Image (tube, coloured by chain):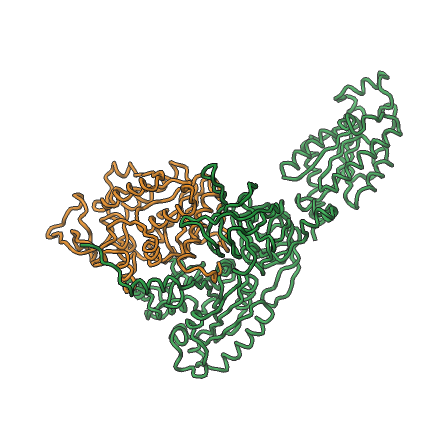
Amino acid sequence: MSPSAPSQEFRAYVNAREKRDVLRFITCGSVDDGKSTLIGRLLYESKLIFEDQLARVEADSKRHGTLGGALDLALLVDGLQAEREQGITIDVAYRTFSTDKRSFIVADTPGHEQYTRNMATGASTADLAIVLIDARKGVMPQTRRHTTILSLLGIRHVLLAINKMDLVSWSHTVHEGIVGVYRDFARQLDVTDVTCIPVSALTGDNVVEPSTVMNWYHGPTLLQALESADVATNRGSAPFRMPVQWVNRPDAGFRGFAGTIASGLVRPGDPVLICPAQKPSTVSRIVTADGDLTCARPGQAVTLTLADEIDVSRGDVIASTNQPPGQSDQFACHLIWMHENALLPKRPYLLKIGTCVAGAQITALKYTLNVESLERVAAKTLELNDIAYCNISLDRQIAFDAYRELRETGGFILIDRYTHETVGAGMIDFALRRASNLTRQKFTVDKPTRSAQKNQKACVLWLTGLSGAGKSTTANAVEQRLHALGRHSYVLDGDNLRHGLTKDLGFTPADRVENVRRIAEVAKLFVDAGLIVLVSVISPFRDEREMARRMMDEGEFIEVFVDAPLEVCEQRDPKGLYRKARAGEIKNFTGIDSAYEPPEQPEILLKTGERSVDDLADEIIAYLRSRVDQAEP
Amino acid sequence: MPNQTGLSHLDELEAESIHIIREVAVSFAKPVMLYSIGKDSSVMLRLAQKAFHPAPPPFPLLHVDTTWKFPEMYDFRDRMARETGMELIVHVNEEGRAQGIGPFTHGSALHTDVMKTQALKQAIEKYGFDAALAGARRDEEASRAKERVFSLRTRTHRWDPKNQRPELWRLYNPHVSNGETMRVFPLSNWTELDVWNYIDREHIPVVPLYFAAPRPVVRREGTLIMVADQRMKLEPGEEPETKQVRFRTLGCYPLTGGVESDADSVPAIISEMLSATESERQGRVIDRDGEGSMERKKQEGYF
């Protein structure tokens, strides 16, 4: 038997279905507003429930249903067993359904506050949101919270479904009251298009079929609104962006850059800029397995080849030359915290934007947003579900766009370096510094910026004391600890510097002053570079140490008196210098024939004769920690 | 991501899947693609070829063989491996085979656990795979609808539905800690109908068992089970009859019910589906082991 050939009508039908577009939407609202029931109702009334699924829901309704054994449509949607038992939706669930007009991907997200991160997740890929309201309760804190999140995530179209109208006697007045309150709130946000629909998910009124009882309502049903929603964004006319996902090099003769087009159109011959390196080139071919394309559009996964042999790698963005993306390593952004472990400002996280991953840290928490009142509240940390406005600093330049202009090159996630959890999601607002300014105005990046990038507060630990007191040993131990903590440090050792920087100087009082001055100048530069500088030099005179202190900013100079009695130092005599000095072979030796003026009020006093090096180093680290803590706002 | 790109529904699904498959190839040290021989695997394999064109997919295929597949499935598997030129790793739980574990003698639950769930864990550990692409779709079963595209498995291969990473935009988090692995589902947003439409559009070869043909079957517990080989013992009074049947889903033949159908071509299948009244997994015996049985199996490490 030969397979039956498809009819022309069949082909036409399949082709028409194939041409339908997709609408991705999200449903959100407070607990028990009936989201799952509403989606269940949409599926049920659109004749999208298979008989066996329905039979199973009927059986489940008798066991877990909340309707006394009657068909509980929420059970179609609430998939996880745990949810059935709790009677709530605990996570984001994706469903697909379609009508003759459109195909839909629905993210059903929970109303519980602790699951708000899932709502943001669902919203990130949606074009439109259905916000559910229980007509008996009106606009709830969760309604405001969710609408704020929708707005932040760039959703401009909201269908406000005022549900359970059957429980308020289908009252027009109740409906109008809720609509007024909601519109007043939405007006303060970027949600520009709100359609309000009175429905009953339980009875089906205005879900698919128009209500026969609410004669006062003349707008579309929920399904009609979904089918006709015009969510056209102009991603096609936006500037071209393609984050490079993978470099395709099967052999020496082919080198292509694979990626998904984030925005704009691209054609062979288009001039492009590889960002952030700013290298220009021209698109040669748009390669796909189905043949080369003459034009590629947003959302398409393609492979571009370029006319020039230039270095392009994963994480780069191939972009329009006329309207290139911005580039920077510091941004102001909105951040939604998504993890039970609080945000630690200054802690290093990984940031993923497009296909690029960079080291990142929050350098300033400007405020958190009270999403019910939209008030700005000062904050020192972020807890799960907090929404903040903050500055973020990266360890490299990246190409980016403002999120409100281009979602895909403006949205990022933060990943914890240690647990690998996704801990936050952010939307770039603007760059704090432009790289183009950087090259022209070299001083735009300053000491706090550099320090912040290194996740530390720059300073000088000035270790003074007799020869053999243990300055270099202590400095070495401290630097090892700093290194292990991921801090950036440098030791300026008086003896070592005498091989170069101060090799022309002797040990006369004048030379000693110049010696300290040079070392202090170098220390100052290193502090400016953002480093934690350890100076290990006898520096016997108070005045010179005071001079060094004055060269630094307030609080940056930390005098550490490494105090060991002369007898102990002379007994240790690690370099044999005391013996030579006593023998008269060395002149002007501190403690023997040259004075040592001990600090009067050192920040740290270390009695090295009585304690282990580890102990001493720990004390200095503890001091540095307390200093950073005090500096926190 | 936002639509309105001028791409059709199917084009958009295709592009999304390619993006996901590429992301796996670049983010993991040793990824693998699970190949179950079914239609979803066929589609996923074609998408992988498209994703890396003109290069071949940079990972091998892994078939976890329960030894109870339909004979045609083995023929088809070997043909596809030949035609694509991709490396095909076949793994059998040899302990299970030595003990003679099978669905008739040990029941579907034990058979599936030993020959499929445990076998998959063995293979992943044996080869040191850190990510496995699989063709599961969210429309197949309620618990799948909640699973992420990049779905973390613990050291013991368990899925923790209450502790899933948020997935925003196209930004997948591929990071795993020592011993953890990732399951990745590039067809998450496809439906059964999308899969068939794509097979139709792209002329993707599938196992002939999907097409209706006269086949020897017996009716057991309301399901038509094909008498595929001599291991099938007939119960007293059972007489195989030849019926025009096809399979909507392919697994171990004793666990896969056929449906009576005249759909002998891809367009005929699509026509049939457009008027279908029963969902695809209905033919799978394991889904009816108890309410929530798929979720339980997944937590235990079943795909």
Q: Residue furthest front?
A: A269
At x 27%, y 50%, the residue is: B250
Residue A23 picture location, percent across and down? 44, 64
**A555 vs B243: above or below:** above
Give the colour in which the image draws chain A.
green
Residue A424 in view: no
**Along the line of sight, the residue nearer the viewer: B208 or A36:** B208
Classify residue A222 by image quadrant: bottom left
- Write the residue at 41% across / 76% down: A206
Q: Position of residue A496 (x, y in %)?
A: 75, 27
- Total marks shown come to 0
Q: Residue furthest bottom?
A: A215
Q: Colour of chain B?
A: orange
Say which residue appears at 65% left-offset and 62% top-offset. Answer: A377
Whether residue A532 is visible here, answered yes or no, is yes
Which residue is nearer to you in this view: A248 or A457? A248
Q: Is residue A215 above or below residue A630?
A: below
- Classify residue A153 as left or right of residue A251: right
In percent of the image, x 83 and y 42: which residue is there? Answer: A550
Place of residue B216 in the rendered image (x, y in percent of width and height, measured from the top left): 16, 51
Location of residue A586 by image quarter:
top right
Q: Is residue A211 left or right of residue A468?
A: left
Q: Position of residue A236 (x, y in %)?
A: 52, 60
Residue A523 figure quarter: top right
